[in-house]
Every structure is written in C-alpha cells, then in structure tokens.
Amino acid sequence: DTGVSQDPRHKITKRGQNVTFRCDPISEHNRLYWYRQTLGQGPEFLTYFQNEAQLEKSRLLSDRFSAERPKGSFSTLEIQRTEQGDSAMYLCASSPSTVATEAFFGQGTRLTVV
Amino acid sequence: SQKIEQNSEALNIQEGKTATLTCNYTNYSPAYLQWYRQDPGRGPVFLLLIRENEKEKRKERLKVTFDTTLKQSLFHITASQPADSATYLCALDETGGSYIPTFGRGTSLIVHP
C-alpha cells in the first residue's frame, strides 16, 4: 500500500464546466476527509465520510459540490458549474480510526478554472 | 469567533539552532492538537499529536508543548537542518467533536546553511 492516492494531480477547466476528482484512501481506513487549500492558507475542511456514510459537510460547501464514497472505498468529489473561485488544491486524507489519530494526506489535485 | 493563529511571517534561522513555532487558539476547547509538515505542492505530513491532558511530547528532534490555560502550543525543532525548511501546520479538534482536524494557516520555516 503506497498511501492515499489522488487523481488527477492537475486539472485545468473552463468556467462553467463540471469536474470530478478521485481519492483512493489507505486500505481499511474507515475515515475519509476532503479539504480545500488556497495559497498561503491552511487546509479548509469540506466534508468527511465514516465508511460509506457522509457524516458532516462544511457550511461553506456550496450546493455545486457533491461527494460520494460508494462501498466505503474510494471517494469522488464533483464540482458542477465551476467558478474561478473554485481554483485551489483539493486534498483528500484518510485515517484508521474513529478516535483521534493522524490523518494521512494525498498529494492533492490542483484545480485551475480559467 | 473561533480562531487558530499561526505566525504568517516566515521564520528564518541558522542551521543548528532550535526553531520554535507557535500555535494560538481562541474559542476552542481542543481534545487534541496535531502538527503537520507541508512542502510546496504536496499534501501535509503528520508529525506529532498531543492530547489535552498531556503537557509535552517528543519525537527525535521534535518537541511539542500544549498549554490549555494559555491556549497555546509550541513546536520545537532542535539542531535544525536546511531539510527542515517547510511550512508547519497546527490542527486541533474540540472535546466532544467529530475528530475532524481544523487547521491553522501554517508558518513557513527557512533554515539557512
């Protein structure tokens, strides 16, 4: 197992297009998080899953954003009708437990909306 | 409002010295606090976790302190090396929370040879 994997690493899209990102967590990690990070800022929480259940979403998460984790394995994050303000690094992380443990992050997907 | 504050100015130090980074928080009651390292263009990497009932934790050249009265954590790197140059993020979660790390903006550390 090589850690959390995210695909693609980079995505350039035109404003108004839909994009989908994929995250493959570390095997048997039951928690999966999505964060967004812009330049000079820390990661900002978007949503998280406990197995296949999406348990919490940030109030900042627009209706244009949707995430799934079918069968509690990989996860996808879709952004519909992208806007320039969506340009950011989208980070996925997983952790093995429901109690406080470290989060293992992927390399992120860099989205640029032009 | 809730805030996690890390110095936005980069910390420049000479190789071999001890680097000390600060994380202050307001309107949180953290159950634990974590420190991560982030290199440009890469995801954060976990370094240390300290719980609310712990005062200090060490790992090799790293030391973290946690003062819930001052609402502050200090992160120390002893005998710093140029390879330690990176952005260091603190993250915390509240007592009774969902164990979702909430991050500060991070502080950039630059170690000069």
Image: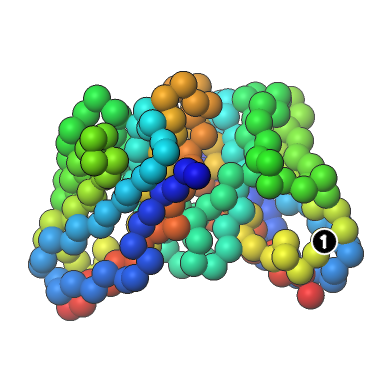
Indicate whether A24 appears above or below A20: above
Looking at the image, residue A10 sits to the left or right of residue B97; the answer is right
In the image as oriented, which residue stretches furthest toward the bottom? Answer: B113
Residue A76, horizontal then vertical, whole percent: 74, 43
Left or right position of B89 against B73: right
> Which is nearer the eye, B49 or A12?
B49
Residue B85 visible: no
Please, which chain is the residue tagged with disc 1 on?
A
Give left or right: position of B73 versus A111. Answer: left
Work out whether B57 lies above or below B8.
above
Colour scheme shown: rainbow
Q: Residue at x 11, y 66 (%)?
A: B17
Q: Quadrant of residue B92?
A: top left
Q: Residue at x 77, y 48 (%)?
A: A62
Farthest-out residue, front: B1
- The number of numbered badges drawn on the structure is 1
Residue drawn where x is 73% and y is 51% of the image: A21
User: For the residue carrying disc 1, how many other residues have a C-alpha within 10 Å: few (<14), some (14-19), or many (20+)?
Assistant: many
Q: Position of residue B64 (x, y in %)?
A: 22, 43
Write the residue at 87% across / 58% down: A81
Measured from the top left, where is residue B56 in percent x and y? Answer: 17, 36
User: Helix or strand or loop: what does disc 1 sit on?
Assistant: loop
Q: Amino acid at mark 1?
A: Thr
Which x, y percent locates residue A108?
59, 56
The residue at which mark 1 appears reads as A82
Placement of the C terminus of chain B among the 4 image quadrants: bottom left
Is residue B19 at least partly visible in the picture? yes
Tell which of B3 and A75 is nearer to you. B3
